[in-house]
Image: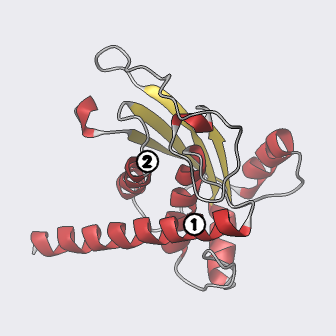
Amino acid sequence: MSRDAGPRARVTRQRRGGVSITSTELAALVVRALRTSDAPPYGEVALTLVDDATIATLNKTHMGKRGPTDVLSFPLLDPHEYPARPGVRRAARPRRRAVRSPKTGASVPLGDIVISVDRAIEQAREGRGGTDGETQHSVADEVRLLAVHGALHLCGWDHATATSQAAMWREQERILRAHTAAMKRAAAAKK
């Protein structure tokens, strides 16, 4: 892949099984979210699929919260590297692009996304998934949503207020609809 093609995503499966989605599709979905969020074209994200025990440890260590959660994001760039997001309050500094293009072929880490496959399975099966926490859908759809959610957090999106939450949820849905349409077009082209 040419570095001019846009940001990249690497997927690692520490927790195997339980979800029928390829690493290639997950990477493409994260890249779609990064592009729509104006991430640097030479940026790279690491997405790791883990179990509940692993994410519970990360949640305690980094967030100070007990127990597993569905997704964690660890952004490495200042939110001012991205456009202002609806409803997201931040210090009154203008947007900047301090991150310079690296040497040819190099990438700049944008952050990490960690998804608990165990949480995704439980939320999907029990109808506690989706953006409303009341949606029953496939495990793959729940993992897709969590991947987009995590990518948006890396790019300065948040859901701490009603306004920012509504905007972030709309953006997630827009990205997921575009991804689904692209997947359908690709499948039709193969026929």
Which percent across, then down, holds residue 189? 11, 70
x and y, in percent, of residue 102 in the image: 38, 17
Tell me which residue sits at (62%, 48%) in the image. 114
Q: Secondary structure at mark 1?
A: helix
Circle 2 — which element?
A: helix
| Mark 2 crowdedness (10 Å alpha carbons): few <14, some 14-19, many ≥20 | many
Callout 1, which amino acid?
Ala
From what the image shows, is residue 52 above or below residue 166?
Answer: above
Q: What residue do we see at 58% from left, 63% from top? A: 168
Q: Residue at x 60, y 50 (%)?
A: 153
82 with respect to 89 (left or right): left
Q: Quadrant of residue 178?
A: bottom left
Q: Is residue 90 left or right of residue 31?
A: right
Q: Quadrant of the N terminus?
A: top left
Q: In the image, is residue 27 above or below residue 163?
A: above
Residue 84 disc label: none
Q: Does residue 169 sit above or below 34 in this rendering?
A: below
**Residue designated by label 1:** 167
The image quadrant of residue 184 is bottom left
Q: In the rendered structure, are the residues bearing label 1 and label 2 in contact, judged by CB atoms less than 8 Å apart?
A: no
Above or below, 15 relative to 97: below
Per the image, the residue denoted by label 2 is 34
Picture quadrant of residue 78: top right
Whole-percent x and y of residue 79? 61, 38
Q: CA distance from mark 1 to mark 2?
A: 16 Å
